[in-house]
Image (cartoon, coloured by chain):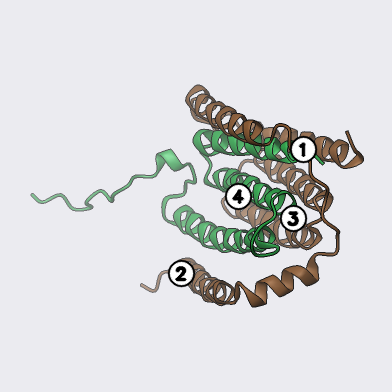
Chain colours: A green, B brown
Amino acid sequence: MHPVVPLLTAALLFGVGVYGVLVRRNAVLLLMSVELLLNSVNLVLVTADATVRAALPATGTVFALFVIVLATAELGVGLAIILRLYRLRRAVAVDEIPLYDEPLDEPQ
Amino acid sequence: MTVADVLLTALGVVALGSALLVVSTRHVVRAGLWLVVTLGAVAGLYLVLTAELVAWVQILLYVGAVVVLLLFAVMLTRAPIGASDDLDRQRWPGALVGAGTAVALAALLAGAYRDTEVALPTPGTAERIGAALFRSWVLPFEVVGVLLLAALIGAIVLSRPEDN
Protein backbone atom coordinates (compact mmCIF):
# COMPACT_ATOMS: atom_id res chain seq x y z
CA MET A 1 0.00 0.00 0.00
CA HIS A 2 1.38 3.41 -0.98
CA PRO A 3 0.38 5.86 1.79
CA VAL A 4 0.90 8.75 -0.62
CA VAL A 5 -2.47 7.98 -2.30
CA PRO A 6 -4.76 8.66 0.71
CA LEU A 7 -2.47 11.49 1.85
CA LEU A 8 -2.78 13.25 -1.51
CA THR A 9 -6.55 12.68 -1.41
CA ALA A 10 -6.62 14.32 2.04
CA ALA A 11 -4.54 17.29 0.83
CA LEU A 12 -6.83 17.92 -2.16
CA LEU A 13 -9.94 17.43 0.00
CA PHE A 14 -8.58 20.07 2.39
CA GLY A 15 -8.09 22.47 -0.52
CA VAL A 16 -11.67 21.88 -1.68
CA GLY A 17 -12.90 22.53 1.87
CA VAL A 18 -10.91 25.77 2.13
CA TYR A 19 -12.42 26.90 -1.17
CA GLY A 20 -15.91 26.09 0.13
CA VAL A 21 -15.39 27.95 3.42
CA LEU A 22 -14.12 31.04 1.60
CA VAL A 23 -16.65 31.10 -1.23
CA ARG A 24 -19.99 29.91 0.19
CA ARG A 25 -22.34 32.56 1.56
CA ASN A 26 -25.07 30.33 2.99
CA ALA A 27 -24.12 29.43 6.58
CA VAL A 28 -25.36 25.83 6.26
CA LEU A 29 -23.20 25.29 3.16
CA LEU A 30 -20.30 26.82 5.11
CA LEU A 31 -20.72 24.16 7.80
CA MET A 32 -20.73 21.44 5.12
CA SER A 33 -17.36 22.73 3.88
CA VAL A 34 -16.04 22.66 7.46
CA GLU A 35 -17.06 18.99 7.60
CA LEU A 36 -14.93 18.40 4.48
CA LEU A 37 -11.93 19.98 6.25
CA LEU A 38 -12.42 17.79 9.33
CA ASN A 39 -12.75 14.68 7.16
CA SER A 40 -9.47 15.35 5.39
CA VAL A 41 -7.72 15.74 8.75
CA ASN A 42 -9.23 12.44 9.89
CA LEU A 43 -8.00 10.77 6.71
CA VAL A 44 -4.44 11.91 7.46
CA LEU A 45 -4.71 10.60 11.03
CA VAL A 46 -6.01 7.18 9.96
CA THR A 47 -3.38 6.89 7.19
CA ALA A 48 -0.65 7.79 9.66
CA ASP A 49 -1.90 5.03 11.93
CA ALA A 50 -1.52 2.48 9.12
CA THR A 51 1.86 3.87 8.02
CA VAL A 52 3.93 5.01 10.98
CA ARG A 53 4.93 2.77 13.85
CA ALA A 54 3.88 4.93 16.82
CA ALA A 55 5.06 4.66 20.42
CA LEU A 56 1.46 4.16 21.57
CA PRO A 57 -0.65 1.75 19.50
CA ALA A 58 -3.70 2.95 17.53
CA THR A 59 -3.14 6.62 18.44
CA GLY A 60 -4.16 8.01 15.06
CA THR A 61 -7.43 6.08 15.10
CA VAL A 62 -8.22 7.27 18.63
CA PHE A 63 -7.52 10.86 17.57
CA ALA A 64 -9.77 10.41 14.53
CA LEU A 65 -12.59 9.25 16.81
CA PHE A 66 -12.06 12.30 19.04
CA VAL A 67 -12.16 14.59 16.00
CA ILE A 68 -15.44 13.00 14.86
CA VAL A 69 -16.99 13.60 18.31
CA LEU A 70 -15.74 17.19 18.37
CA ALA A 71 -17.12 17.75 14.85
CA THR A 72 -20.53 16.53 15.97
CA ALA A 73 -20.54 18.86 18.99
CA GLU A 74 -19.38 21.76 16.81
CA LEU A 75 -22.13 21.07 14.30
CA GLY A 76 -24.84 20.95 17.00
CA VAL A 77 -23.86 24.34 18.42
CA GLY A 78 -23.25 25.78 14.94
CA LEU A 79 -26.71 24.81 13.73
CA ALA A 80 -28.29 26.22 16.90
CA ILE A 81 -26.50 29.52 16.20
CA ILE A 82 -27.64 29.49 12.56
CA LEU A 83 -31.29 28.84 13.49
CA ARG A 84 -31.14 31.59 16.13
CA LEU A 85 -29.66 33.95 13.57
CA TYR A 86 -32.36 33.05 11.07
CA ARG A 87 -35.05 33.79 13.63
CA LEU A 88 -33.51 37.16 14.51
CA ARG A 89 -32.45 38.38 11.05
CA ARG A 90 -34.38 36.25 8.52
CA ALA A 91 -31.12 35.61 6.65
CA VAL A 92 -28.41 32.95 6.63
CA ALA A 93 -25.99 34.67 4.25
CA VAL A 94 -22.88 35.21 6.33
CA ASP A 95 -21.82 38.44 4.61
CA GLU A 96 -25.20 40.10 5.14
CA ILE A 97 -25.14 39.75 8.92
CA PRO A 98 -24.46 43.07 10.65
CA LEU A 99 -21.79 42.59 13.30
CA TYR A 100 -23.40 45.12 15.65
CA ASP A 101 -26.95 46.25 16.33
CA GLU A 102 -28.07 49.57 14.93
CA PRO A 103 -29.28 51.72 17.82
CA LEU A 104 -33.08 51.72 17.66
CA ASP A 105 -33.64 55.18 19.12
CA GLU A 106 -31.28 57.84 17.89
CA PRO A 107 -30.68 60.40 20.64
CA GLN A 108 -32.34 63.63 19.62
CA MET B 1 -0.12 -1.29 -7.73
CA THR B 2 -1.84 -3.61 -5.30
CA VAL B 3 -5.58 -4.09 -4.86
CA ALA B 4 -5.50 -1.69 -1.90
CA ASP B 5 -3.87 1.00 -4.04
CA VAL B 6 -6.50 0.64 -6.75
CA LEU B 7 -9.32 0.81 -4.19
CA LEU B 8 -7.76 3.82 -2.47
CA THR B 9 -7.36 5.66 -5.77
CA ALA B 10 -10.92 4.92 -6.90
CA LEU B 11 -12.47 5.93 -3.57
CA GLY B 12 -10.27 9.02 -3.45
CA VAL B 13 -11.46 10.11 -6.89
CA VAL B 14 -15.09 9.60 -5.84
CA ALA B 15 -14.54 11.57 -2.62
CA LEU B 16 -12.82 14.44 -4.40
CA GLY B 17 -15.36 14.64 -7.21
CA SER B 18 -18.35 14.71 -4.90
CA ALA B 19 -16.56 17.19 -2.59
CA LEU B 20 -16.10 19.50 -5.57
CA LEU B 21 -19.84 19.18 -6.26
CA VAL B 22 -20.60 19.98 -2.58
CA VAL B 23 -18.78 23.30 -2.84
CA SER B 24 -19.95 24.17 -6.36
CA THR B 25 -23.57 23.01 -6.77
CA ARG B 26 -26.27 25.66 -6.99
CA HIS B 27 -28.87 23.59 -5.10
CA VAL B 28 -28.59 23.72 -1.31
CA VAL B 29 -30.23 20.32 -0.80
CA ARG B 30 -28.06 18.64 -3.44
CA ALA B 31 -24.95 19.91 -1.64
CA GLY B 32 -26.11 17.95 1.42
CA LEU B 33 -26.74 14.82 -0.66
CA TRP B 34 -23.32 15.07 -2.39
CA LEU B 35 -21.84 15.38 1.11
CA VAL B 36 -23.30 11.92 1.82
CA VAL B 37 -21.34 10.54 -1.16
CA THR B 38 -18.13 12.23 0.01
CA LEU B 39 -18.48 10.97 3.58
CA GLY B 40 -19.32 7.46 2.35
CA ALA B 41 -16.25 7.40 0.09
CA VAL B 42 -14.06 8.56 2.97
CA ALA B 43 -15.58 5.80 5.12
CA GLY B 44 -14.58 3.37 2.35
CA LEU B 45 -11.04 4.76 2.51
CA TYR B 46 -11.01 4.09 6.27
CA LEU B 47 -12.17 0.52 5.60
CA VAL B 48 -9.35 -0.08 3.11
CA LEU B 49 -6.89 1.39 5.62
CA THR B 50 -8.15 -1.27 8.12
CA ALA B 51 -9.75 1.24 10.49
CA GLU B 52 -13.18 -0.41 10.49
CA LEU B 53 -14.36 1.15 13.74
CA VAL B 54 -13.71 4.68 12.44
CA ALA B 55 -15.46 3.75 9.19
CA TRP B 56 -18.62 2.59 10.96
CA VAL B 57 -18.55 5.55 13.36
CA GLN B 58 -18.24 7.77 10.28
CA ILE B 59 -21.30 6.12 8.71
CA LEU B 60 -23.32 6.27 11.94
CA LEU B 61 -22.39 9.76 13.08
CA TYR B 62 -21.68 11.63 9.86
CA VAL B 63 -24.01 10.06 7.31
CA GLY B 64 -26.63 9.18 9.93
CA ALA B 65 -26.67 12.21 12.20
CA VAL B 66 -24.69 15.12 10.78
CA VAL B 67 -26.21 15.07 7.29
CA VAL B 68 -29.73 14.71 8.70
CA LEU B 69 -29.06 17.68 11.00
CA LEU B 70 -27.74 19.70 8.06
CA LEU B 71 -30.81 18.86 5.95
CA PHE B 72 -33.06 19.86 8.87
CA ALA B 73 -31.19 23.17 9.04
CA VAL B 74 -31.70 23.62 5.29
CA MET B 75 -35.44 23.09 5.77
CA LEU B 76 -35.76 25.25 8.90
CA THR B 77 -33.99 28.21 7.30
CA ARG B 78 -36.34 27.99 4.28
CA ALA B 79 -33.53 27.51 1.80
CA PRO B 80 -34.60 27.88 -1.82
CA ILE B 81 -35.68 24.60 -3.40
CA GLY B 82 -34.48 25.22 -6.95
CA ALA B 83 -31.18 26.49 -8.24
CA SER B 84 -30.08 29.80 -6.77
CA ASP B 85 -27.31 32.03 -8.05
CA ASP B 86 -26.53 33.91 -4.83
CA LEU B 87 -24.95 31.02 -2.91
CA ASP B 88 -21.39 32.03 -3.74
CA ARG B 89 -19.31 35.12 -3.27
CA GLN B 90 -16.71 36.13 -5.83
CA ARG B 91 -14.97 32.88 -6.71
CA TRP B 92 -11.39 33.64 -7.70
CA PRO B 93 -9.93 34.63 -4.28
CA GLY B 94 -11.32 31.48 -2.70
CA ALA B 95 -10.18 29.36 -5.64
CA LEU B 96 -6.70 30.88 -5.42
CA VAL B 97 -6.34 30.23 -1.68
CA GLY B 98 -7.91 26.75 -1.90
CA ALA B 99 -5.71 25.68 -4.81
CA GLY B 100 -2.65 27.11 -3.09
CA THR B 101 -3.43 25.20 0.11
CA ALA B 102 -4.03 21.98 -1.81
CA VAL B 103 -0.83 22.30 -3.86
CA ALA B 104 1.28 23.17 -0.82
CA LEU B 105 -0.07 20.28 1.29
CA ALA B 106 0.16 17.85 -1.64
CA ALA B 107 3.75 18.85 -2.38
CA LEU B 108 4.67 18.46 1.30
CA LEU B 109 3.05 15.04 1.69
CA ALA B 110 4.20 13.76 -1.71
CA GLY B 111 7.74 14.85 -0.94
CA ALA B 112 7.68 13.05 2.39
CA TYR B 113 5.95 9.82 1.33
CA ARG B 114 6.64 9.54 -2.42
CA ASP B 115 8.57 6.26 -2.31
CA THR B 116 7.19 4.82 0.90
CA GLU B 117 5.43 1.49 0.68
CA VAL B 118 4.06 -0.23 3.77
CA ALA B 119 2.15 -3.42 4.45
CA LEU B 120 -1.34 -2.79 5.78
CA PRO B 121 -1.80 -3.73 9.44
CA THR B 122 -4.03 -6.67 10.28
CA PRO B 123 -7.74 -5.77 10.38
CA GLY B 124 -9.88 -6.21 13.47
CA THR B 125 -8.90 -3.01 15.22
CA ALA B 126 -11.87 -2.44 17.52
CA GLU B 127 -10.33 -4.35 20.42
CA ARG B 128 -6.98 -2.58 19.97
CA ILE B 129 -8.67 0.82 19.79
CA GLY B 130 -10.68 0.06 22.93
CA ALA B 131 -7.51 -0.90 24.78
CA ALA B 132 -5.70 2.24 23.60
CA LEU B 133 -8.68 4.45 24.42
CA PHE B 134 -9.19 3.17 27.96
CA ARG B 135 -5.51 2.68 28.85
CA SER B 136 -3.71 5.68 27.33
CA TRP B 137 -6.48 8.16 26.56
CA VAL B 138 -8.93 7.86 29.46
CA LEU B 139 -8.62 11.48 30.59
CA PRO B 140 -9.29 13.00 27.14
CA PHE B 141 -12.17 10.57 26.78
CA GLU B 142 -13.77 11.88 29.99
CA VAL B 143 -13.08 15.49 28.99
CA VAL B 144 -14.84 14.83 25.67
CA GLY B 145 -17.87 13.68 27.69
CA VAL B 146 -17.92 17.00 29.56
CA LEU B 147 -17.51 18.88 26.27
CA LEU B 148 -20.45 17.04 24.72
CA LEU B 149 -22.59 17.96 27.73
CA ALA B 150 -21.51 21.59 27.42
CA ALA B 151 -22.32 21.60 23.69
CA LEU B 152 -25.73 20.05 24.40
CA ILE B 153 -26.58 22.66 27.03
CA GLY B 154 -25.26 25.42 24.79
CA ALA B 155 -27.41 24.31 21.87
CA ILE B 156 -30.51 24.12 24.10
CA VAL B 157 -29.89 27.59 25.57
CA LEU B 158 -29.27 29.08 22.11
CA SER B 159 -32.41 27.63 20.56
CA ARG B 160 -34.74 28.45 23.46
CA PRO B 161 -37.39 30.98 22.47
CA GLU B 162 -37.15 34.49 23.84
CA ASP B 163 -38.95 34.92 27.21
CA ASN B 164 -40.15 38.49 26.88
Instruction: Say which residue label 3 marks.
Output: B63
Tell me: A95 left or right of B26.
Answer: left
Judging from the image, mark 2 belongs to the subunit labelled B
Give the camera-side residue of A51 and B59: A51
Give the camera-side residue of A87 and A52: A52
Instruction: Say which residue label 2 marks.
Output: B161
Instruction: Say which residue label 4 marks.
Output: A38
Task: Residue B10: name its quadrant.
Answer: top right
Q: Are marks 2 and 4 on the same chain?
A: no
Dot 2 crowding, Cα within 10 Å, few <14, some 14–19, many 20+: few
> Of callouts 3 and 2, which one flags the residue occurring earlier in the amino acid sequence?
3
Q: Residue at x 50, y 54 (%)?
A: A82
The local secondary structure at tag 2 comes to loop
Residue located farthest toward the left when viewing the structure as drawn = A108
Q: Is residue B82 at all visible to an observer of this figure?
A: no
Dot 3 crowding, Cα within 10 Å, few <14, some 14–19, many 20+: many
Judging from the image, mark 4 belongs to the subunit labelled A
Q: Amino acid at mark 3?
A: Val
Cα separation between marks 3 and 1: 17 Å
The percent coordinates of residue B25 (x first, y second) are 67, 33
Judging from the image, mark 1 belongs to the subunit labelled B
Is B36 drawn above or below residue B96 in the view shown?
A: below
> Of callouts 2 and 1, which one flags the residue occurring earlier in the amino acid sequence?
1
